[in-house]
Structures are given as structure tokens and as C-alpha cells.
Image (spheres, helix red, strand yellow):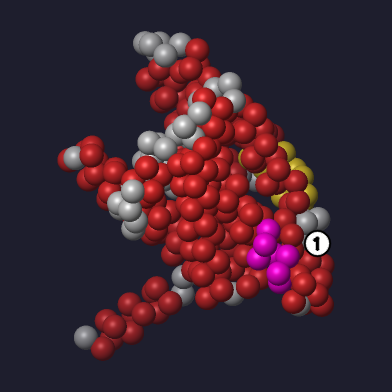
Amino acid sequence: MNNFIVRRRSLFGGLKLNTLLIIINIIAFIIIQILLSINPDFLRYIALNPSNILHGRFLWTFLTSMFSHVAFWHLAFNMISLFFLGSLVEKIIGPKRYLLFYIASGLFAGIVFVLLAGFFGGSFLGAKLFGNPGIFGVGASGAIFGLAGFLAVLIPKKRIYLIAGPLAAIILQAVIQAIFPNNPSSNIIDILVTIYIFISIFLMFSFNSKMKKIILPIEMPFWIIPIAAIVPLVIISLFVPLPIGNSAHFGGLVLGLIYGIYLKSKFPKKTQMISKIFSR
């Protein structure tokens, strides 16, 4: 028994916190798929709904929604982003601070989402920008945008690739569904988008530069990433309903920027050294 305990501790003790967060999200996704297949109404108990929150119901969904994904493409896109961004943040501030910051970013993103959708989502324009009060929100993207905002402040000049291919495919899918809502080929489009996202995941780790062009990698400095990831989607959402929580992304981004600015002002020498090391 003692040997088993030692082995178990060494197995999980060797994993990075960011890796554990990814594993938790994947396990949660599998469990949610099973529960939704049994009872589709289960979503209301884990997803963040502004109307419910403002009426004092299901307050725990601020936390559960952070680790919940319903669509595979959503999980894949978020976990790939978390893999790259989270690894950097964990190296810079350490696992304990990283965990607190990750949770805080996700919670703050949820609060901003609830407030904006709950109080301003009742109008036509407000619903397009922030979502209506009855919408359900899930996903780790609010916390991930917090990481992006943090890195944009601490290592603004570091070059990174924004993988535009999968995002463009999702937007194209939403546009087609909006223009042709009763299109009989919508299931085929969904399958093609899913296959493309699967291929994109493998190509991200490919050493073949020509094959990587399929996923449309766009190189840019870190400080541009949050702008490039939010502004175009906000503009597109004015014309086409996208399954993307812009207000939650904005909330997480704001907290990440604040935390990054705080560290730069409190530890100017250390953060300057970090910027030089990670910008190489």
C-alpha cells in the first residue's frame, strides 16, 4: 500500500499545473457529454446564465462554467490556447499564483458577462454586443483572455502565432447558418469544420512549414493578440450571431491587463528582466 501511495503521488506530482487544468477540462467535457445525453436540461446547472444569476439562482455556475464545454471545437480551441499561454504564465509567476490568477480571471470574466448581458442585453444592439440575459455561457476562454492580457503587458514584444484557420472556419460556419438557417447540408458543414479542427490540432505540432499554412498562422507581437482576438469578433457579431462570448473575453482581458500593470509597477526590475528573457 505504501509503495502504491508513493507512486501515485509521483505520477501526479510531476505534472505542471497548466497540464492539470487541461486534463480537468477534458474530463469535465466527457462527463458533461454523458450527462447531457441523459438529460439535456443539465446545462442550466453548469452554464452561466445572467438572468439566473441576477435572480440569485445557480450562483455556483460562476465556477462550473469555467470548466464546461459543450462543443468539441470549443474545447479544442480553448485547450490549445491554454496549453501555450498557460505554460508561459506558470513559468513567470509560479503555479500557486497562476492558479489564483486563472480562477480570478475566469470569475471576473463571468461577472462582466452577467452584468453586461443582464443590464444591457435587452436591446437589439446590446444583445448583439453582450448577449441577451437568457443566454447560457460556458468555457475557459474568459480565464484564457486573462492570461493573454497579462502576457501582453509583461512580454509585449514576444512574437507569437495567432492560429486563424479554426476560428475562421467557425465564423464561416456561423455565417452560413445565419444566411441559410434551414440548409439541409448544415450537418455536413459541421462535420467538415470538426475534421478541419482535428487536422489543425495535429498541424500545430508539425515540423512541415508548408503543411502548417493550412491552419493560417499569423505571427504578431503579444500586445496585438488581445486586440486581434476581440475587435474583429465584436464587429462580426453586429451582423452575424456568433457562438462566442465577447463580453466575457473582455472581462478576463481587463483583469489580466490590471494584474500585469500591477506587477510591472511593483516589481519594475524583475518584470523588465522577465520581458527580456521571454522576448528572445
Residue 71 found in image quarter: top left
- Residue name at image x 71 percent, y 69 percent: 262
Q: Quadrant of the N terminus?
A: bottom left
Amino acid found under the numbered disc labelled 1: Arg
- Residue 72, image x, y percentages: 40, 39
**Residue situated furthest bottom in the rendering:** 2
Look at the picture and state if 99 lies above or below 133. below
Res 213 visible: yes
Q: Is residue 176 left or right of residue 147?
A: left
Q: Is residue 102 left or right of residue 165?
A: left
Res 84 visible: no
Label 1 SS: loop
Residue closest to the eye, 262 or 102: 262
Assess whether residue 158 is covered by the magenta stretch. no
Chain part drawn in magenta: 257-263
- Residue name at image x 34 percent, y 56 percent: 59
- Residue 200, image x, y percentages: 55, 37
Residue carrying label 1: 280
- Residue name at image x 74 percent, y 76 percent: 266
Assess whether residue 261 is covered by the magenta stretch. yes
- Residue 70, image x, y percentages: 36, 41
Residue closest to the eye, 241 or 71: 241
Residue 150 found in image quarter: bottom right
**Residue situated furthest left in the rendering:** 38
- Residue 100, image x, y percentages: 51, 70
